[in-house]
Image (spheres, grey):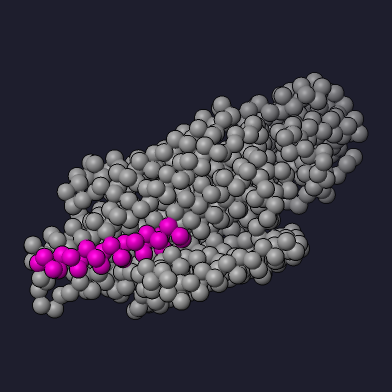
Amino acid sequence: MADIGSATTAPPVSGRRVPLAIGTLMLAMLLAALDQTIVATALPTIVGDLGGLSHISWVVTAYILAATAFTPLWGKLGDQYGRKHLFQIAILIFLGGSALCGLAQEMSHLIGARAVQGLGGGGLMVLTQASVGDIVSPRQRGRYQGFFGATFGVASVAGPLLGGFVVDHLTWHWVFYINLPLGILAMIVIGLVLPAGTTREKHRIDYLGTALLAGIAVTLVLVTSWGGTRWPWGSPVIIGLAIGALGLLVLWVTTERRAAEPVLPLRLFSDRVFSVAVAIAFIVGFAMFGALTYLPLFLQVVHGVSPTLSGVHLLPMVGGLFVTSVISGRLITRHGRYRLFPIVGTGLVTIAMALLSTMTAQTSTLVMSLYFFLLGFGLGGVLQVLVIAVQNSAPYPDLGAVTSGNTFFRSIGGSFGVSLFGAVFADRLAAALAAAGHRSPLPPGTDAQRLQSDPDAVHSLPPDQARQAIDAYADAIADVFLVATPVAAVAFLLTWFLREVPLREATSTADLGESVGAAPATLTSRERLDRALAQHADRDLRRDYYRRLATNAGVDLPPGSCWLLCSLYRAGPGTGTELARRANTTVAAGRPFAQRLIDDRLTSVHDDILVLTEQGAQVAERLLEACRQSLEDFLRDWSPRLHPELREMLAIRARELLGHEIDRPADVS
C-alpha cells in the first residue's frame, strides 16, 4: 500500500496552539498595517509640537518608501534562511523604529525613525502571510489566509480613529509607544509557537537592484518635495537630483537585464495590461495616500475638530472603499468582466478630487462626508480590480511578479502623491498667510512662519486674524486637491486603454490585503496559485465534496466511507476511537461507514484496528487521482501540464486534502 504520509510534511503546530499562532501573526500584521494610517490624524499635533509643517509629507513617505523598497528582500530572505528568526528580527527593527519615533524631538529625527519603522513593518507584512503555510495544513489554509486580508481592512478603519483617540487622551508619542507592548508580546509568542524548521529555498537575491530601485524612488520624491519650496526648480540641487535619478534608472535597467532573479523583471512592461494597470495604480496611490495625509489637517485646523473626530469624519471614505471592493469582487466573480469598474472608479475619484477642492471653513459636515464617501467609493472600484487584471493577463512564471509590481507602483505613487501634495501645500500656504498678514497685521510675537510651522497657533489668534489664517489653510489644502484633479483625470483616461482579458477562475478575486495594503506581496507564482487552490479546496470540501468525488472516480461508496478510505490511505490504520476523532464524530456514527468498507473487502479488522486492504488502496488511489484532476481543472488556464512544479504541487495537495481531519461531520456529508 502506498504511503501517502511520506509525500508531505504535517504542519508542526497543532491543537490549541494554531489559533494562538494565527492570532499572533495577525497582531504583527495589524501593527505594521496600522502604522500606514495611524499617524494621519496625529500629524497636525505632531507638527504643532515639533514644527516643520513643510516636511509633514515625509512622516508618511518615509514609512511607505522603506516598507515598499525592502519588502521583496524580506520575502526571499525568509525563504532562504527560515522565517521564524527573521520574523523576530523584523519585529525588533519595527519596535526599535517605534521607540525612536516616540522619543523624537525634531522632525528630522522622526522622519529617520519612521524609515526604520517602515523597514521592519515591510518584513512583518510579508513574513506573516508566508508563515501561515508553516502553521496550518492546506485543508485549513484557505480560511485562515482570508483573515489577513480582513486585518488590512480593520487597520484602514481603525488607524485614523485610534491615532486621534491616542492624541486626545495621551500624547502623540503614544501613537508609536503603543506598538511596544503588543510587539513584545507577539515576539514572545512567535518564539514559543512558530516552527523554526521550514522548507528552505535557495535564491539569488537582487541586492543591487533593490538598492538602486530604492535610490530612484527616494531621489524622485526629493525632487517633487523640494522643487519650488526649499529650492527653485532650476537650482543646481534639483537639477542634480533629477540627473542622479536618471543615472540610477539607467544603472537599474542594466542590472535587471543581468539579474538571475530581478526584483522587478523588465519583461513585464511588454504586456500592455500590466503597463496600463501599474500606471493607473501609481496615480490611484497618489490620490489615496495624499488624501489620507491632508484631509485630517483640513478637518483639525479649518473645522477645528479634535483628532478623534477627524478620524470619525474619515469613516465615510473608508466605508465607501470597502463597499465597492466587496461589491466589485462579487460581481467580477459572477460575470467574469472587470474593465468597467476602474473606468467608473477613476471617474468618481476625479469628480471627488474636484469637489474636495471646493471645501471651505463653511462646508457642512454632511457635504464633506458625501465628498469623502465618493472618493472612497471610487477608490474601491479600482484597487482590487487592478490586482485582478494584472494577475489575469500574466503567464504563469510572472504571476507573482506582476502582483508585486502593481502594489509596488501604487505604493511609490503614494509616496509621490504625499510629497508633491506637501510641496504644493507648503508653497500655497506660505503665500496665503503672507497675503493675510498684509491685509490684517498679526499680533506681536506671531508671524506667518510660526503659523506655517504650528497649526495649533492659528486658534490662539484674535478672531479676525484666526479667520484669515484658517481661510489660508483652507485655500492651501483646496489647491492641493485642485492640483490632484487633473492627475486623477489622467488615470481615468488610461483606464480606457485597459484591455479586458477573459477571466481565469483562479484570479477571479483578489486578496483584500493586496488591494489596500501599501507594501508589495512577495509570493511566487507557485505560492500564489497554491493559495488560490487552498481557498478553492476549502470551499469545495464543505459542499458535498466526497459524494461528487466518488461519482467522478466511479466509486460506489457513500461520502463517509470515501473519507474513511482516504484517511486510512493517508494516515494509516487506526482504532475506531482514533478514526472517530479524525472525523470529529462518534464511534457509533462512524460504524456504518466502516462496516460498508469491510463488507466490500476494502478494509479488514485486526485486533480492533481497521486496516486498508490492497483492493482498498487501489480504490483510494482512484479517489486521489480524481481529486488531483479536479484541482488541475481549476488551474487549467495556467497549463499545469507544461509546468512540472505545478504538476508536483497538484499531486501533493491532493494527497494532503483527502482524508484529512475535519472540523465537522458536514464536511463529508
State whether residue 550 is above or below residue 440.
above
Residue found at the far front of this picture: 234
Residue 97 shown left or right of residue 584 in the figure = left
Residue 504 shown left or right of residue 45 in the figure = right
In the image shown, does 550 or 389 lie closer to the viewer? 389
* Residue shown at 55% from the left, 72% from the top: 244
Q: Position of residue 554 (x, y in %)?
A: 82, 22
Residue 371 showing in the rendered view: yes
Residue 387 shown left or right of residue 414 in the figure = right
In the image shown, does 506 or 608 lie closer to the viewer? 506
* Numbered circles on residues, count: 0
Q: Position of residue 423 (x, y in %)?
A: 36, 64
In the image shown, does 637 or 601 lie closer to the viewer? 637
Answer with the quarter of the image where residue 497 lies.
top right
Q: Position of residue 514 (x, y in %)?
A: 54, 49
* Residue shown at 35% from the left, 41% from the top: 351
What is the quadrant of the N terminus in the image? Answer: top right
* Residue shown at 70% from the left, 52% from the top: 267
Residue 136 showing in the rendered view: no
Q: Which residues are magenta?
A: 415-440
Q: Position of residue 29 (x, y in %)?
A: 51, 57
Answer with the quarter of the image where residue 586 lies.
top right
| Residue 406 part of the magenta-drawn span | no
| Residue 432 part of the magenta-drawn span | yes
Residue 454 shown left or right of residue 267 in the figure = left
What is the quadrant of the C terminus in the image? Answer: top right
| SS majority, magenta | helix
State whether residue 624 is above or below residue 120.
above
